[in-house]
Amino acid sequence: MRFSSFLKEFLAISLFLTAVSATSFSWAGAYDDFIYAVKFDDEKRVALMLQRGIDPNSIEEERGETALMIALRENSMRVFATLLQHPDIKLEAGSANGDTALMLASYLANFEAVKSLIATGAKVHRSGWTPLHYAAAAGQVEIIEYLLDHAAQIDAISPNRTTPLMMAVSSGRNKAVSVLIERGANLQARNDAGMTAYDFALHYEQKSIAKDLAKRSAQIKP
């Protein structure tokens, strides 16, 4: 009797473990299908898989980016809209390097995505690197102005105290530099290396920007 009871218990456990293993394998396959559907803007497939319970915040292993960020990078805007409407979407989920969806949209010049993310509740300002840094580095003037109009901190500092103005200068984004200065960016701010925006212009050989910054700095009263 004891052996019979043990055998029944053993078989029950074995069946349970087999079922769990099969389920895990099934979800692994579903995950791959989901990421593929996101990349190729297959909105119907994505919507169906979301209804079946797949995580809208699934992460791709290669970059550590969320499905929302993958949709942005691949310009899968129908899928992006579907994911954005999901009640469990995590707007502030970061990739392996700390990027957020709003930071990525700002860098990729996807103005419509920037507006949609902010309207849905994405944080315009955060500690460390910000969407404004990314928009400035890419010279996205329209997005820079929109972020500033929605409470972005113009002199936001990165972990090494680099400001958006410094990013725009180092990338040679003349229009972005002008807009940031006109909106009140601090020309005297220094990063951890003691460099100002003017120093960045010299270092990266942005001669026209350096000339303009020198002229503007001379007009500032001590």
Image: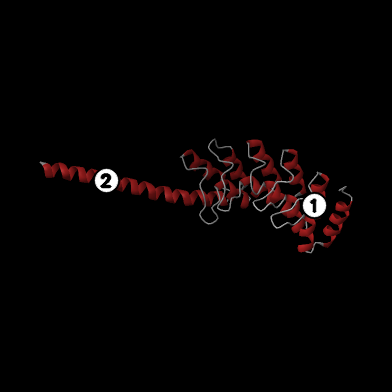
What mark, if any, has residue 187 been given in the picture? none
What kind of residue is marked 2? Answer: Leu
Residue 112, percent from left and from top? 69, 43
The residue drawn where x is 66% and y is 39% is 118
The number of callouts visible is: 2
- Mark 2: few, some, or many residues within 10 Å (few <14, many ≥20)? few
Horizontal side, residue 213 vs residue 50: left or right = right
Residue 95 visible: yes
> Which of disc 2 and disc 1 is earlier in sequence?
2
SS assignment at label 1: helix
Q: Position of residue 198 (x, y in %)?
A: 80, 57
Q: Position of residue 189 (x, y in %)?
A: 76, 50
The quarter of the picture where the N terminus appears is top left
Q: Secondary structure at mark 2?
A: helix
Closer to us: 51 or 24 = 24
Residue 11 horizontal/vertical position (percent): 22, 45
Contact (CB < 8 A) between labels 1 and 2?
Answer: no
147 sits left or right of 14 in the view: right
Image-quadrant location for residue 148: top right
Q: Residue at x 78, y 59 (%)?
A: 199
Tag 1: amino acid: Val
Scheme of colours in the image: secondary structure
Q: Which residue is mark 1?
A: 177
* Residue at the disc numbered 2: 15
Closer to the camera, 87 or 154?
Answer: 154
Q: Residues within 10 Å of mark 1 (few under 14, many from 20)?
A: many
Query: Would residue 74 be seen by someone viewing this image from the given angle?
Result: no
As measured in the structure, the alpha-carbon distance from the residue carrying label 1 to the one carrying label 2 is 65 Å
Q: Which is nearer the eye, 120 or 78?
A: 120
